[in-house]
Image (tube, rainbow, N blue to C red):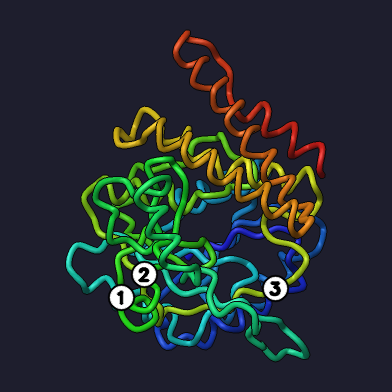
């Protein structure tokens, strides 16, 4: 099990508490820690008598570098990923392990339930029941799936999928089914997912990330292309704590929020050249439609975050175009150059 953490001493003890209560006991916890002076190391040591743990220090880089360290050190048949602010249900590990009994499963995603921690009591939020299962309007989504959100061939029956426009999308037509039974789905959120170690053998994330948005679907796509199914099991649950920070830190700050959306929209360029079913025409259709939606919401609701989101779409296209052009002419441009500028300016 891999847990990447940074500045979470106030929360990570709750995660470890939940892991001590798992019904399935045969697992190791790899804590990838980027030191911040908050004494997370001491909390890890306090739990070494209760859990099989290994502490690995990350001396540089971002969350993607932490995940690569986790993949390097992980042993065993299954590699699970858990956020440092995600509280697993007591049967969480067991549910993941049992799902691999299904035929040809290479990766499993579980349900992520937003919750507030008050006086050591977890209270699910009332406005959102799941961060994975969509609650969009099926009619509009069904139109989008035919025009700007068409799934890559082979992902038509996946709950979470990558579209031909290179965007992570959610299939609302599978929403009701996903609440009651396992469905196919690319890996949903790093807060709750796992992969077979031999299926991910040889996989490493490239260094063109800072905040790590869409890394789950990048890994899921890799496993899917190797011929394996990926499954969403709603019974494998974690509570995801609602608070002011995430692994990407302070995302409400405008420049950091822009970087977040740039990386989210950049999946098209990460897959370009590897996924033959990506479509420039679908990318343009998605860009036009999503921009029109942003403009409508800005005019109607005065959403400032929508302005940031809309601008970020075009930033991602500019950075992506520079990257592809550099590849074509044999240049050495890396998107990390521009992404770091956004990241460092918002620290």
Q: Do the residues labelled 2 and 3 touch (CB within 8 Å)?
A: no
Q: Which of 71 and 256 is in front in this view?
A: 256
Who's the residue at 73% across and 45% down the image?
308
Q: Distance between the residues labelled 2 and 3?
A: 22 Å
Who's the residue at 53% across and 11% down the image?
331
Please, what secondary structure does the residue beneath circle 1 have? loop
Q: Are marks 1 and 2 in contact (CB under 8 Å)?
A: yes
Q: Quadrant of residue 258?
A: top right
**Dot 1 or dot 2, earlier in sequence:** 1
Q: Distance between the residues labelled 1 and 3?
A: 26 Å
Residue 268 percent location from the top left of the image: 46, 37
For disc 1, the marked residue is 182
Question: Can residue 250 be seen at all in this image of the molecule?
Answer: no
Q: In which quarter of the image is residue 157?
A: bottom left
**Dot 1 or dot 3, earlier in sequence:** 1
Q: Which of 30 and 7 is in front in this view?
A: 7
221 vs 8, left or right, is left
For disc 2, the marked residue is 232
């Amino acid at each position: 099990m891999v847990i990447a953490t940074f500045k979470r001493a106030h929360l990570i003890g709750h995660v470890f508490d939940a892991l001590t209560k798992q019904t399935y006991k045969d697992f190791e916890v790899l804590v990838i820690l980027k030191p911040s002076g908050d004494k997370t190391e001491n909390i890890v040591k306090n739990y070494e008598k209760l859990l099989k743990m290994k502490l690995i220090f990350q001396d540089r880089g971002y969350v993607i570098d932490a995940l690569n360290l986790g993949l390097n050190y992980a042993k065993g048949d299954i590699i699970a990923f858990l956020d440092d602010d995600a509280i697993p249900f007591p049967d969480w590990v067991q549910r993941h392990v049992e799902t691999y009994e299904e035929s040809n499963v290479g990766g499993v995603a579980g349900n992520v339930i937003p919750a507030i921690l008050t006086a050591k009591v977890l209270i699910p939020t009332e406005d959102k029941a799941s961060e994975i299962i969509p609650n969009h309007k099926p009619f509009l989504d069904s139109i989008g799936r035919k025009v700007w959100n068409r799934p890559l061939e082979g992902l038509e029956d996946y709950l979470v999928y990558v579209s031909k426009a290179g965007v992570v999308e959610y299939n609302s037509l599978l929403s009701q089914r996903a609440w009651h039974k396992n469905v196919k789905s690319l890996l949903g959120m790093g807060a709750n997912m796992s992969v077979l170690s031999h299926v991910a053998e040889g996989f490493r994330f490239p260094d063109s990330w800072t905040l790590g948005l869409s890394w789950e679907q990048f890994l899921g796509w890799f496993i899917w292309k190797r011929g394996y199914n990926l499954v969403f099991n709603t019974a494998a649950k974690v509570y995801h704590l609602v608070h002011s920070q995430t692994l990407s830190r302070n995302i409400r700050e405008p420049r950091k929020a822009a970087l977040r959306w740039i990386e989210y929209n950049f999946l098209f360029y990460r897959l370009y050249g590897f996924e033959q079913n990506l479509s420039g025409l679908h990318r343009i259709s998605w860009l036009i439609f999503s921009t029109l939606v942003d403009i409508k919401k800005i005019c109607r609701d005065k959403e400032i975050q929508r302005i940031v989101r809309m601008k970020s779409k075009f930033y991602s296209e500019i950075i992506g175009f520079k990257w592809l052009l550099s590849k074509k002419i044999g240049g050495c441009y890396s998107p990390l150059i521009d992404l770091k500028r956004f990241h460092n300016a918002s620290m």
